[in-house]
């Protein structure tokens, strides 16, 4: 009996070893957001909240409302205008809520909030831990660009600008599209890093979007006058001189550039047009029957794909279409309310 018990105890000991080795807890990994496309959803203007969706390339899946998922269901705030990534942080520019939410660019975890901005629109990196933010101001016409110290998350300086929108930072200068806000302006103002204006370059009416191309030139889209229904254009700024201006149909929007910075795209009269920077004539890139109004464009350089956000109205979910460079549809996604932009990760 004693020998039997001994063998039984030995068997149980070795059996326990094998069980403990085989029952280790499985390794789990957290979702990251640095290998896909971040989808910026403005949200309903009144009473709504902006959201972020994320297309994960490796899994070929769209993850919805990832900011809330990573932050215990917290909402971003009213009207998510744009997102800028600088180093390890993503800066969520929240227009109506008058703030900039700072999150980890890889995990989307909340880190901080920048206050002291009113109707903010866009952010641009100046380097050395500084950035500049465009805003329309409390009344929508007394706009400013504001200098932000990214280490202290504080606004440190500002200068008046007429309804500033997108900005391009190049050659130690800040080029600012002046829309006029709820008014109207027709210039690109050029500022030093001290924010002081150096020159003003006249362009079309209600200047809204800008991108820098591979040659170091700047392309400027003017949406046209809401009052006179004229003045829409796309122009090239070379060495601070306007060249290659094309008059456009009223209210074009959403100027972007591809990954090689050789082709610009924008929306005109419900279609997507294209200009090659070395042959600056307008050509139609995409004229297909898509559902809803085009509300945002983006470019994913990994897939060489154009993202087009469309909306049926101002409160329903959007449909995002993805096309290759030949205009062939790759996929379509159901994204948040008023999808207005995309950010390659």
Image (cartoon, rainbow, N blue to C red):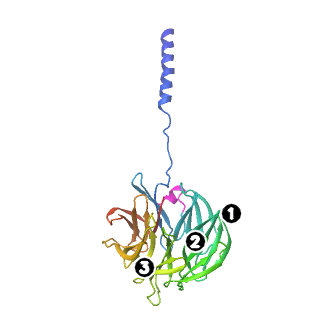
Q: Nearer the viewer, mark 1 or mark 3?
A: 3
Q: Which residue is mark 3?
A: 252
Rounded to the nearest angstrom, the CA distance separating label 1 from label 3 is 38 Å
Residue at 45%, 70% in the rendered image: 256
Q: Earlier in the sequence, mark 1 or mark 2?
A: 2
Few, some or many C-alpha atoms within 10 Å of disc 3 (few <14, some 14-19, many ≥20)?
Answer: many
What is the CA distance from the residue labelled 3 to the residue labelled 2?
A: 27 Å
Q: Residue furthest bottom?
A: 228
Q: Secondary structure at mark 1?
A: loop
Residue at position x 32%, y 73% in the image: 287
Residue 191 spot, x, y in % from top left:
62, 76
Secondary element type, mark 2: loop
What residue is shown with label 2? 97
Question: Can you tell which of label 3 and label 2 is closer to the viewer?
Answer: 3
Residue at disc 3, secondary structure: loop
**x and y percentages locating residue 75 in the rendered image:** 53, 63
Say which label, 3 or 2, has the lower sequence index.
2
From the image, tell me which residue sits under label 1: 152
Q: Nearer the N terminus, badge 1 or badge 3?
A: 1
State the extent of the magenta-drawn residues as a range.
65-74
Q: Nearer the viewer, residue 213 or 151?
A: 213
Mark seen at residue 308: none
- Viewer-closest of 157 and 279: 279
Mark 2 surroundings within 10 Å by alpha-carbon count, few (fewer than 14), some (14 through 19), many (20 or more): some
Where 60 falls versus 9 (above or below)? below
Residue contact between numbered discs 3 and 2, judged by CB atoms under 8 Å: no
Assess disc 1: are there few (<14), some (14-19) or many (≥20) residues with their C-alpha within 10 Å of its C-alpha: few
Q: What separation in Å lies between label 1 and label 2 (alpha carbons)?
A: 20 Å
Q: Is residue 145 left or right of residue 1?
A: right
Q: Where's residue 305, x and y in %? A: 39, 62
In the image, residue 328 above or below residue 238: above
Q: Tell which tag, 1 or 2, sits nearer the viewer.
A: 1
């Amino acid at each position: 009996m004693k020998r039997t018990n001994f063998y039984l105890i030995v068997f149980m000991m070795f059996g326990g070893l094998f069980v403990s080795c085989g029952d280790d807890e499985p390794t789990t990994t957290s979702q990251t957001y640095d290998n896909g496309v971040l989808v910026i959803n403005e949200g309903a203007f009144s009473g709504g909240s902006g959201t972020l969706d994320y297309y994960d390339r490796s899994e070929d899946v769209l993850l919805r409302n990832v900011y809330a998922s990573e932050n215990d269901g917290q909402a971003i705030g009213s009207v998510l205008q744009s997102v800028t990534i600088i180093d390890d942080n993503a800066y969520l520019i929240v227009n109506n809520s008058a703030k900039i939410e700072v999150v980890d660019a890889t995990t989307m975890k909340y880190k901080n909030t920048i206050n002291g901005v009113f109707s903010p629109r866009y952010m641009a990196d100046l380097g050395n831990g500084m950035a500049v933010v465009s805003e329309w101001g409390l009344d929508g016409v007394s706009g400013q660009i504001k200098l932000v110290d990214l280490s202290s998350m504080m606004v440190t300086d500002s200068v008046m600008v007429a309804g500033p929108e997108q900005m391009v930072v190049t050659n130690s200068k800040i080029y600012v599209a002046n829309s006029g806000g709820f008014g109207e302006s027709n210039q690109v103002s050029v500022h030093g890093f001290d924010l002081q204006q150096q020159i003003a370059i006249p362009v079309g009416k209600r200047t809204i979007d800008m991108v820098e191309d591979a040659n170091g030139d700047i392309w400027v889209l003017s949406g046209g006058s809401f009052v006179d229904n004229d003045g829409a254009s796309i122009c090239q700024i070379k060495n601070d001189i306007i060249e290659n201006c094309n008059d456009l149909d009223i209210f074009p929007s959403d100027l972007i550039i591809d990954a090689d910075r050789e082709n610009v795209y924008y929306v005109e009269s419900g279609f997507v047009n294209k200009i090659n920077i070395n042959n600056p004539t307008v050509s139609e890139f995409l004229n297909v029957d898509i559902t809803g109004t085009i509300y945002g464009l983006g470019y994913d350089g990994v897939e060489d794909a154009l993202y087009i956000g469309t909306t049926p109205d101002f409160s329903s979910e959007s449909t995002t279409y993805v096309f290759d460079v030949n205009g062939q549809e790759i996929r379509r996604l159901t994204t948040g309310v008023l999808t207005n932009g995309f950010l390659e990760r």
